[in-house]
Amino acid sequence: MQSIRIRPPEIEDRLVLGQWKGDLIKGAGKCSSADTLVERTTGFAALAATTRTVVDSIAAVLNGEPAAMRKMMACDQGSEMHGHKIFIERTGLRIDSVDPHGP
């Protein structure tokens, strides 16, 4: 994963489709989890239930979108994305990671 600090400037303008933000929500006692995915230009949101691995769940949701909507995803550097290389292979998306402990 590359740092979110070196991504292209057009991402900040939110004018280009296909730029996603992913966040993991963990339930009480970490017994359950779900991923939220938000496309930054349209605000379209999707929920990926993690009945499988996080990578499988997110890939399944994003691969259901048109190719023009699948360019990049920003995510935290949590352990849930330890399989980011597999995710990149399955989706073709570039992954940018936010700074540890950043806002």
Image (cartoon, helix red, strand yellow):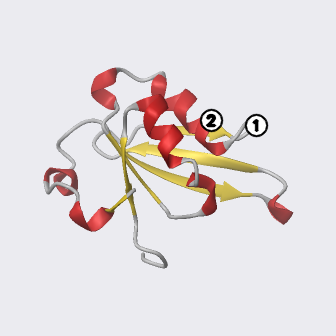
Residue 31, image x, y percentages:
85, 55
Please determine whether, in this image, residue 12 is positioned above or below residue 71: below
Q: At 32% across and 23% down in the image, what residue appears? A: 67
Residue 49, image x, y percentages:
68, 38
Choose top left, top right, bottom left or bottom right for residue 5.
bottom left
Residue situated in front as seen by the camera: 34 or 56 = 56
Residue picked out by circle 2: 57
| Amino acid type at image mark 1 | Thr
Residue situated in front as seen by the camera: 14 or 22 = 22
| Amino acid type at image mark 2 | Ser
Element assignment for label 2: helix
Q: At 62% across and 35% down in the image, what residue appears? A: 57
Residue 9, image x, y percentages:
14, 57
Residue 80, image x, y percentages:
62, 55
Q: At 35% across and 32% down in the image, what residue appears? A: 70
Residue picked out by circle 1: 51
Residue situated in front as seen by the camera: 70 or 46 = 70
Label 1, label 2: how far apart the Cα atoms are = 7 Å
In the picture as drawn, the residue positioned furthest to the bottom comes out as: 101
User: How many residues crowd around disc 1 within 10 Å: few (fewer than 14), some, or many (20 or more)?
Assistant: few
Tell whether 8 sits left or right of 75: left
Tell whether 64 sits left or right of 40: right
Please determine whether, in this image, residue 79 is positioned above or below residue 60: below
Please determine whether, in this image, residue 73 is positioned above or below residue 65: below
Q: At 72% across and 51% down in the image, what residue appears? A: 33
Are dots 1 and 2 in contact, CB under 8 Å?
yes
